[in-house]
Structures are given as structure tokens and as C-alpha cells.
Image (cartoon, rainbow, N blue to C red):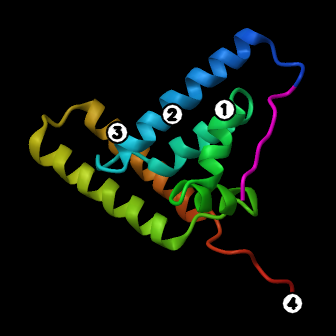
């Protein structure tokens, strides 16, 4: 399903450029996050999609129709859903990253701040629904 949306007509050329930069940078970080433990893939892809809708119909359509990112975006738009598999993957990734940081780096406040951020991010991820709730 090809979805093409136009950026809002009231958007200036400068804001479209800035949103476009944000979209491509977020997409790049999201792609890197697929293989780097501790970086949240889903959040960067959601940010890229949001910025793309304000800047690049082509990038927005590509994300919407991508075999990996499309379902994530569809779930998010249809009830702010994050699949259990993504939640488990994020949790394992964050635990691995936190463990590596604690073993390999000096235990200073930046390490604890990063781990606190991962904990907060993980709590937020697990607070999202995993499927649409059916009315009874």
C-alpha cells in the first residue's frame, strides 16, 4: 500500500529542510541502533516518520511501506502499540548495554545517568499496549 502525503502547505522551506534533516538523521541512528545494543531503534524510526511527514512525502512513503518499519509505524498510528517482541528486544539490548558499560567503563555519574535513562525508557516502552483492546 503506497501512502503519499504532502507536507503541510503552511510549512516554510526552512522548516521542511530542518524536518528533513531530522528525519534522515533519526533514520540513520535508527538503522545503526539495529546492531548497537542500548540504542532504541523504534523511537528513532517513529521520530523519522514524524519528521518525514512534515518534510518528505517520498521518505514518508518509503518508511510506511518498508517491510520492517511499516508495521511498527502502523501499530503506533493505530493505538500507540509496541509489539511484545520489540519490547523484549529493547529490554535485552538495554540490559546488555548496561552490563557492558558497568564491566568495561569507570563507574562515574555519566554511566549511572545512561543506565537511569535506559530504565526510564524501558518503563515507558512496557507501559505501551501490545495490541488493540477489543471492546467487551
C-alpha separation, residue under disc 3 versus residue under disc 1: 25 Å
Q: Are marks 3 and 2 in contact (CB under 8 Å)?
A: no
**What main secondary structure does the magenta stretch of the protein show?**
loop
Label 3 environment density (alpha carbons within 10 Å; few <14, some 14–19, many ≥20): some
Residue 129 found in image quarter: bottom right
Q: Are marks 3 and 1 in contact (CB under 8 Å)?
A: no
Instruction: Give me the disc on residue 51.
Output: 1
Q: Are marks 2 and 1 in contact (CB under 8 Å)?
A: yes
**Residue 32 horizontal side relative to residue 64, left or right:** left
> What residue is disc 3 on?
114
Magenta-drawn segment: 1-8
C-alpha separation, residue under disc 4 versus residue under disc 2: 39 Å
Instruction: Say above or below: 128 vs 115.
Output: below
Q: Earlier in the sequence, mark 4 or mark 2?
A: 2
- Secondary structure, mark 4, is loop
Instruction: Give me the disc on residue 136.
Output: 4
Determine if the magenta segment contains residue 107.
no
> What residue is disc 2 on?
26
Label 2 environment density (alpha carbons within 10 Å; few <14, some 14–19, many ≥20): many
Residue lying at the far top in this picture: please name it: 14
Q: How many marks?
A: 4
Determine if the magenta segment contains residue 3.
yes
C-alpha separation, residue under disc 4 versus residue under disc 3: 42 Å
Q: Residue at x 29, y 46 (%)?
A: 36
Amino acid at each position: 500500500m503506497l501512502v503519499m502525503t504532502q507536507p503541510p502547505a503552511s510549512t516554510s522551506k526552512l522548516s521542511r529542510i530542518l524536518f528533513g534533516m531530522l528525519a534522515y538523521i533519526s533514520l540513520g541512528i535508527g538503522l545503526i541502533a539495529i546492531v548497537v545494543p542500548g540504542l532504541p531503534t523504534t523511537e528513532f524510526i517513529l521520530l523519522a516518520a514524524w519528521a518525514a511527514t512534515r518534510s518528505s512525502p517520498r521518505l514518508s512513503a518509503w518508511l510506511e511501506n518498508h517491510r520492517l518499519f511499516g508495521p511498527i509505524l502502523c501499530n503506533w498510528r493505530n493505538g500507540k502499540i509496541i509489539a511484545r517482541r520489540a519490547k523484549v528486544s529493547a529490554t535485552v539490548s538495554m540490559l546488555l548495554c548496561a552490563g557492558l558499560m558497568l564491566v568495561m567503563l569507570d563507574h562515574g555519574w555519566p554511566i549511572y545517568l545512561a543506565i537511569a535513562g535506559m530504565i526510564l525508557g524501558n518503563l515507558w516502552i512496557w507501559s505501551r499496549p501490545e495490541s488493540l483492546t477489543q471492546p467487551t
